[in-house]
Image (spheres, rainbow, N blue to C red):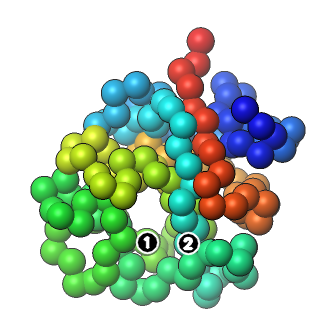
Amino acid sequence: MTPDDLVLTPLGLRFRRRLYPCSIGRGGLSHCKHEGDGATPVGVLHVVGMFYRPDRMARPASWAQPIGPSDLWSDDPDDESYNLLVRKPYFHSHEVLRRADPLYDLILITDWNWPHATPGAGSCIFIHQWRRPHFPTEGCVALRRDHLIDIAGKISPGTRLLTRARP
């Protein structure tokens, strides 16, 4: 473990000797993640991408990619594009990345079940903005907007997200 790891603790997300309050999945932490369980997986995940809304914020890092109006994320385990970025028109189950609310204005993409997804093992775990303090997610890790932007400006591709079962 290094100070540059994002470490999920019972008190929040630790990064560079600072603790950031965060939310996790409504299903808690799980060693056996599956699609629809609402759980945050236990393990070592890596940040492999960063997307942001250029109409709502400045580019948070040089490697961040803009979210376009047709960008979606497939969460259909029966489709060959499961757990990948797809674009409209897309007729399978998916998440809209360009949302009306601010939750996905900035998204850090992890390598959970990616890039070669196992059907049913759960779609991508994002790190994104929370709805409100400690409001649970569908399995992602969520942070206050200013904290998320701060972290995004300091990480690089491959940064580790360490999640472990809480005692």
Q: Label 2: which residue?
A: 51
Relative to 106, is 164 above or below?
above
Asked if residue 158 shows in the view, the reply is yes
Relative to 41, is 91 above or below?
below
Of 110 and 57, the residue lying toward us? 110
User: Quarter of the image holding residue 149?
Assistant: bottom right
Residue 67: where, in percent of width, then height? 50, 80
- Please give the name of the residue rendered at 25% of the width and 60% of the height, measured from the top-left corner: 82
Is residue 121 rendered to the left or right of residue 40? left
Q: Label 1: which residue?
A: 97
Relative to 151, is 89 above or below?
below
Three-letter code, disc 1: Leu
Q: Which residue lies furthest to the top in this view?
A: 167
| Cβ–Cβ under 8 Å for marks 1 and 2 | yes
Of 119 and 132, the residue lying toward us? 119
- Please give the name of the residue rendered at 59% of the width and 12% of the height, measured from the top-left corner: 167
User: Quarter of the image holding residue 58?
Assistant: bottom right
Residue 29: where, in percent of width, then height? 47, 28
- Please give the name of the residue rendered at 54% of the width and 65% of the height, measured from the top-left corner: 49
Query: Of discs 1 and 2, which sits in the foreground?
Result: 2
